[in-house]
Amino acid sequence: MNIAMDMENDLKLKELHWRLRAKVENFLNKLNHLEISAGIFSGWRTWTEQENLYQQGRTEPGNIVTYAKPGDSLHNYGLACDVWPRTPEGNWNFKATDEEMNLLGTIGKGFGLHWGGDYDGFPDKAHFYVNAGHQTSDLKKIYESEGLAGVWNHIDAVNQPPRV
């Protein structure tokens, strides 16, 4: 992996909640150790970014890529990210085979991540997330009154970070 890709992953990792960040960092290190070139394509998303993705394939050109409206995605709380393989040239490999994506899923789950490839009906094989101990409807209410910091405080009250 080149330095630019490392920096891109580092920036996206910093936007994730610590529970997801630690697992994804270990996951990406394992992929690197196995010489599998991959990275975080999408991590934390603003509600506006989520709305734009939701409209894709509906009111905007393109294929439907999400069924989650703003506030209904764990991406909006830094609790989910999309990890895609890269081509030998370093570009995102959105045409990765099921075999390649299933391998990422297996490795990611080995680090305690939940995998969107296990979804019924609309599998999302690039999607990895952690269970926050709250429903997204509850996270949305907290976010609307306390912002992202409030959401993370509520999650941390349920799930204490590891002591270093």
Image (cartoon, rainbow, N blue to C red):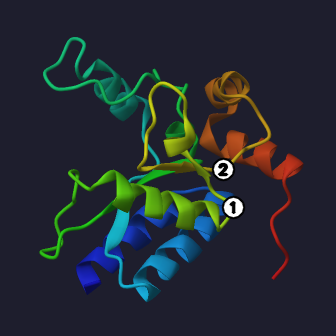
Q: Residue at x 18, y 72 (%)?
A: 90
Check disc 2 and report its element: helix, strand or loop.
loop
Q: Position of residue 114 (x, y in %)?
A: 63, 50
- Residue 112: mark in rendering: 1
Q: Residue at x 34, y 69 (%)?
A: 38
**Quarter of the image holding residue 62?**
top left
When the figure is inspected, residue 135 is found, relative to residue 77, above or below; the finding is above
Q: Is residue 151 above or below residue 128?
A: above
Q: Give the residue type at disc 1.
A: Gly
- Of the 4 image quadrants, the one containing the C terminus is bottom right
Q: Amino acid at mark 2?
A: Val
Numbered tag placed on residue 130 in the rendering: 2
Query: Image check: 65 left or right of 164?
Result: left
Q: Position of residue 61 (x, y in %)?
A: 13, 21
Give the image quarter of residue 55.
Answer: top left
Residue at 20% over, 51% down: 95
Between 83 and 117, the one lying in front of the other is 117
Q: Position of residue 162 (x, y in %)?
A: 82, 71
Q: Which of 135 and 38 lies nearest the eye of the viewer?
A: 38
Residue 76 - label:
none
